[in-house]
Image: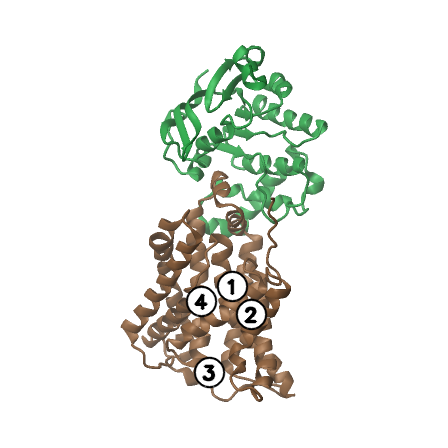
Amino acid sequence: MKNVLEVRDVHLSFGGIIALNGVNLQLREGEILALVGPNGSGKTSLLNCICGFYKPQKGSIIYKGKDITKTPPHVRAEMGIGRIFQTPYIFHGTVVDNIMVGYVTKNRNLMSLLTSKSTVEARELAEELIEFVELEIYRNSPAHGLPMGIRKRIELARVLMWNPDTLLLDEPTSGLSIDEKRDMARFILELNEVHGKSILLVEHDLSLVHDIAHRAVVMDAGVEIAEGTPEEVVNNPEVIKAYLGE
Amino acid sequence: MVLLEMIVMGLAAGTIYGVMALSFVLIYRVGKIVNIAVGDMVLLGAYLIFAFSGLGLVEDPVINLILGLILASIFGLVIAVGTERFLMRPLYGQSILSLIMMTVALGMILRGATIVKWGTVLRVFPGQHEVFPPIPFTIGPIEIPYVYLWSITGAFLIFGSFLYLFRKTLFGFAMRAVSLDPEAAATHGISIKKIYTYTWMIAYVAAFLAGLVLGAINGITVIVSYLGLARALPAALIGGLDSPGGAMLGGLLLGLIEHTVGTFLNAYIPGIRAIIPYIVLLVVLIVKPYGLFGTVRIERV
């Protein structure tokens, strides 16, 4: 399988604090790669570098063979990278409004964004995705005050509006109940197996990683300490040391 | 009957305060920029409408003035692009104070440019007396100066268009998304630079419409700039800095109080009418620090 995304020797620091210290990572086409590690190990910072939220001081990000290190975040999205945040990013409006805004990535022309034709198209697509994430009953509810599990699904549906090939999911199951976690895992698997999305999954729940990920990379203190199948990494002494100490 | 007339006049004047406040609030809501240049944008609009309608492209004075407004607005779109690209964009990510100081500089540049081009002599729009006849428009027993009919119509059009844009179109959704968190919006595929530019465009067009009305009421002179800021700021703060609907309601409330309470008290305390907006502002901010419709910020500690 060829690599869809490559992170090469990425360094990122904030003042004197080193967040990433020469990280290398490859996401293969059609796989679910889990990125695990203790809090503060640099997982979210790495996702932020990949989607363009942060600019690394050194190193490069290659997407589908193209160096995107200096590409603006909205262009990376347009190229096929969709990212969901640990705390869902939801603006004041209904559930369907919040999902429809993802259509802007597909169609950048201002004039067409003002027409009812594009609004109708976006609404139709949003309705399909509302069905996919099973939010039919919340369709016209104000999105801002909804529970975390619902807001995570809204954000996932929004990202799917522009049909990205690659998904960066930052702790998609954190703060969810067991049932909600199961549903989210089902959506992730369907996106991977049925729709062929390559997925980089930041996740603390190792049993979920074990169940759905093809490979896992473990990070600690801004560096990659282990890589392999989920079974291999959880038994790796370095990983045990990072999580439990000496 | 006098009171009813004062109420109608107050609401009519309030519509244009609301339009200026909308211009101010939009820039704050989307870009988190306190735009001190709003009054100077209003002034520039008045002069540009004066200049374009002075070309006399059509004979009918009403159409000529509307054409002047349209051409000035098109020119305003270009200035909006320049404002965002060359003055604001280099400062994104810098302190709020830097952005405010840049708007102060923008105001000085715009005001200075009008003085260089048109001097300080009071001017009136070409054909002003035909477009805004001195005899007021009468609805039953109420008399309203014609300029306020323009104000009401213009405010209705611009506010209605804006509300449609903001609430019903994908462009409006993108604006709302950027106003919440620009970096996250960019990650979700929205070009924030474009949204900022379009927001400045709307702000300029709204300010130019206000320039037409204030210029017609007061004559076109630098005083329009001070009046613009002096009314836009309290109207925006009363309504709530980040609420476009609140901006219009703040403007209406301000106009209403100014033309009723202000006019009444002015008979006893000459000059108080000019400071009434700020007294109202103080009362509102003491009772509701985020304005009547502003977002209450809750911070985790």
| Spatial CA span between label 4 and label 1 | 9 Å
Residue at (60, 76) in percent of width and height: B256
Q: Nearer the viewer, residue A50 or A19?
A: A19
Disc 1 to disc 2, how far (Cα)? 9 Å
From this view, report whether residue A148 is shown above or below residue A216: below
Q: Earlier in the sequence, mark 1 or mark 3?
A: 1
Task: Name the residue rendered at 60%, 55% in the picture.
Answer: B295
Q: Are marks 4 and 1 on the same chain?
A: yes
- Coloration of the structure image: by chain
Q: Tag 2 or tag 4, which sits nearer the N-term?
A: 4
- Judging by the rendered image, the residue that carries numbered circle 4 is B207
The answer to whether residue B153 is visible is: no
Q: Are marks 1 and 3 on the same chain?
A: yes
Chain under numbered label 3 = B
User: Chain A appears what colour?
Assistant: green
Dot 1 or dot 2: first in sequence order is 1
Residue to which mark 3 is pinned: B132
Asked if the residue under mark 2 is in contact with the one under mark 3, i.e. CB atoms within 8 Å, the reply is no
Looking at the rendered structure, the secondary structure element under dot 3 is loop
- Do the residues bearing badges 1 and 3 touch, measured as CB atoms within 8 Å? no
| Residue with the mark numbered 1 | B22
Do the residues marked 1 and 2 share a common chain?
yes
- Secondary structure under the numbered disc 2 in the rendered image: helix
Estimate the spatial distance between the alpha carbons at disc 3 and disc 4, rounded to whole Å: 20 Å
Mark 3 or 2, which is nearer the eye? 2
Crowding at label 1, few (<14), some or many (≥20) Cα neighbours within 10 Å?
many
